[in-house]
Image (cartoon, coloured by chain):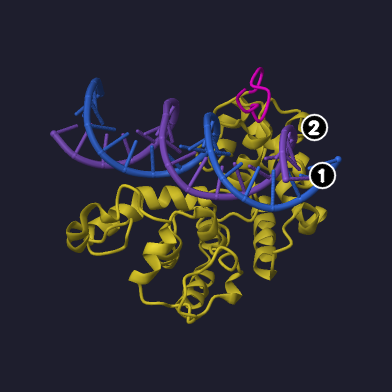
Chain colours: A yellow, B blue, C purple
Amino acid sequence: MGRQPCCDKLGVKKGPWTAEEDKKLISFILTNGQCCWRAVPKLAGLRRCGKSCRLRWTNYLRPDLKRGLLTEAEEQLVIDLHARLGNRWSKIAARLPGRTDNEIKNHWNTHIKKKLLKMGIDPVTHEPLHKENKATEKSHGDHLPESENHHVQLPETSGSGTAISEENSCSPPENCSGDESHLLDSICDDFPLMSFLLEDQGPIVDAPWEFPSAGQKQTFDDAGMTSWDEDCGWLLNCQDFGVHDFGFDSFNDRETNMLNTIEIMGSNKQ
DNA sequence: AACGAATTCAACCGCCGGACG
DNA sequence: CCGTCCGGCGGTTGAATTCGT
């Protein structure tokens, strides 16, 4: 009858990932690359659903992820893109290097939505709220494909005069024009990850790993771990594998520098 | 200091669409 | 053309954390 579950529910673990699981997943992907997520749990020795593995990797473990809150420029870009694309978070995320759709979605729901409401802007339609009230349920209830009723409201920044289509919405930043490319430039200039790292706020792979940042040494022993060096070895080895080996062909010099920085940090931690 | 409320965000769920036999 | 499989997406949930009283 119903659709088969994506994976055998029996014996499949759910909930937060442990450092040990992360480690297994990372070392598997670094060794074998991203392929056939369904088979990953079995091959990596994880009692997880393949979907869960993919999600964990793309949303949290990928070495090219930025951490921390979105910058002002990024936030502005998200608002702009949302106005034209609607809740197509993956499309929006594709325009924000190092950010995931989940992260942007969460940020939208927790921060940007409120911000816009405070400013008197409807976060759904991007119209002023009082105007929205006049139109009442016209746009609510079943608000049309978002891109259709959004792009007309905003000044076109893409030059073409048409909304971003599915097909071209994933284009790399270089293809952006006008304000967007400007915004992306400023995002790149900001490069929050670097400042994040340099501020000594701990490693890029934070929380679940429970690395011993200053004053938090206890968790490692508890988890049966050994040291920063040992557990971050995988990350430091990224360059040994070569980013192309695990699907980060889009790495550019900046990201390579990032990995170098991580390596330096790794050695500094010793 | 203690408690409840509010907020945040990692993770899950179910659906959709493309690829493939 | 049809059915199945799989990856990806967007919406939602709930545990953990923060904030206010």
Left or right: where A154 falls relative to A27: left
Q: Closer to the camera, C1 or C15?
A: C1
Whether residue A198 is visible here, answered yes or no, is no
Over which residues does the magenta segment extend?
A1-12
Read off the residue under disc 2. A43
Location of residue B8 by image quarter: top left
Location of residue A5 by image quarter: top right
Where residue A88 sits: x, y (%)? 49, 55
Q: Residue at x 78, y 58 (%)?
A: A244
Q: Closer to the camera, A14 or A158?
A: A158
Residue A106 located within the stretch drawn in magenta:
no
Left or right: where A257 falls relative to A65: right
**Overall secondary structure of the magenta stretch?**
loop
Residue A7 located within the stretch drawn in magenta:
yes
Q: Secondary structure at mark 2?
A: helix
Q: Residue at x 27, y 58 (%)?
A: A122
Q: Secondary structure at mark 1?
A: helix
- Label 1 is placed on what type of residue? Asn
Q: Are marks 2 and 1 on the same chain?
A: yes
Where residue A8 sits: x, y (%)? 68, 23
Q: Name the chain under label 2.
A: A
- Where A154 falls versus A88 (above or below)? below
From mark 2 to mark 1, how far is it between C-alphas? 10 Å
Q: Residue at x 50, y 60 (%)?
A: A92
Q: Which mark is residue A32?
A: 1
Q: Closer to the camera, A265 or A145?
A: A145
- Label 2 is placed on what type of residue? Leu
Q: Residues within 10 Å of mark 2 (few under 14, many from 20)?
A: few
- Where A44 falls versus A154 (above or below)? above
Where residue A155 sits: x, y (%)? 36, 76
Where residue A97 sits: x, y (%)? 57, 62
